[in-house]
Image (cartoon, grey):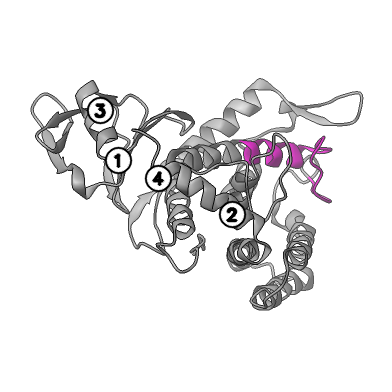
Amino acid sequence: MKHLLNTLFITTQGVWLSLKGENVVIHLDKEHSQKIPIHLMESILCFGRVNATPPVMGFCAEKGVPISFFDEQGRYIARVDGPVRGNVLLRRQQYRLADDKSASSAIARNILLAKIANSRSVLMRFARESGDESSTLTSAIKYLGYLTKDLRKDDSLEVLRGKEGDAARTYFGVFDNMILSQKEHFRFTDRSRRPPMDEVNAMLSFIYSVLSSDIAAALEGVGLDPAVGYLHKDRPGRPSLALDLMEEFRSWLADRLVLSLINRKQINPEGFSRSETGSVLMNEETRKTLIAAWQARKQEELTHPYINEKMRIGLVPHIQARLLARYIRGDLTEYPPYVWK
């Protein structure tokens, strides 16, 4: 259980919530409980086996404190809310900003600043820990540093997307340098998505899909529409806003996980096969290994640089979704993206 940004995060399994007066009572077990006044909370997020009595759900809905339920892996299940008040206003403002190119550029720029800074930090940490001071890696680090400064210009969305493309090509251009073992089986030449044409791309695409789902769930939990973004264009069936926020997490969370599994030989080449079209597929055992590693990674703790609170990595997307919602509502002067350190 953790109280962040006036949001109560409940991750302890078996907890149940009840109502006493104007307080939410969190029952940890038969003997221990904790009371929190309803007026101190903006929302409640419950993960896994967390129960809530009808009276507490009704009272929270009446007071405008929604309760969102997720499974233990963070997938969105449902949200208990009262008569529509804040959500429709929040979403309408979200849509207005998405239709405003200048407003969209401001959000996209901050997201890209974090993405490129995080990609650069991953390369710098690898260079430091491995002792790799090759000219290609050094050049990539320098160019990403230049792009980070260049992004601060008041550019249009199309220009920002072009710079994002430059950054991605630079970063993935040296990605193979960070693969240190099993090089005869795990090589990376370029990013291939649909379909993935090698084992590394197959793993990246799988983890990106899981990450996208987690972020979409976090956005649903705060009342934002995952389909309407700012950096990524709208397309039917695409969670554009989830893909926007995912840019802050790709390199330091998803990519480093894949690299770690390869370099520690926790993934083996026998777990992949090639289809008649040339695409690479993972078997069930490999997918299970990836999912287990992903869930374990989400349990690790870090200190969020903006709110200066220690938390599990799995809660960071929910914090970023809440910060974005606050910016959209006008409570913050700009959106603070997640910068990995």
Q: Quadrant of residue 196?
A: top right
For the residues bearing labels 1 and 2, Cβ distance under 8 angstroms: no
Give percent across and percent down for residue 22.
Answer: 13, 38
**Lower sequence index among marks 2 and 4:** 4
Residues at marks 2 and 4, CA–CA distance in whole angstroms: 15 Å
Q: Secondary structure at mark 3?
A: helix
Is 191 contained in the magenta span?
A: yes
> Residue at 50% of width from left, 63% of height from top?
335
Question: From what the image shows, is residue 301 above or below residue 34?
Answer: below
For the residues bearing labels 4 and 1, Cβ distance under 8 angstroms: yes
Q: Which mark is residue 58?
A: 3
In the picture, the quarter occupied by the N terminus is: top left
Question: Which sits in the foreground, 100 or 11?
Answer: 100
For the residues bearing labels 3 and 1, Cβ distance under 8 angstroms: no
Residues at marks 4 and 1, CA–CA distance in whole angstroms: 8 Å
Say which amino acid is labelled 3.
Answer: Gly
Q: Is residue 17 left or right of residue 272?
A: left
**Lower sequence index among marks 3 and 4:** 3
> Residue at 58% of width from left, 65% of height from top?
110
Bin the neighbour count of mark 3 within 10 Å (Cα to Cα): few under 14, some 14-19, many 20 and up.
some
> Residue at 69% of width from left, 56% of height from top?
178
Q: Give the labeled residue for mark 2.
A: 96
Camera sees residue 180: yes
Q: Give the labeled residue for mark 1.
A: 64
Say which amino acid is labelled 1.
Answer: Gly
Bin the neighbour count of mark 1 within 10 Å (Cα to Cα): few under 14, some 14-19, many 20 and up.
many
Q: Is residue 57 left or right of residue 236?
A: left
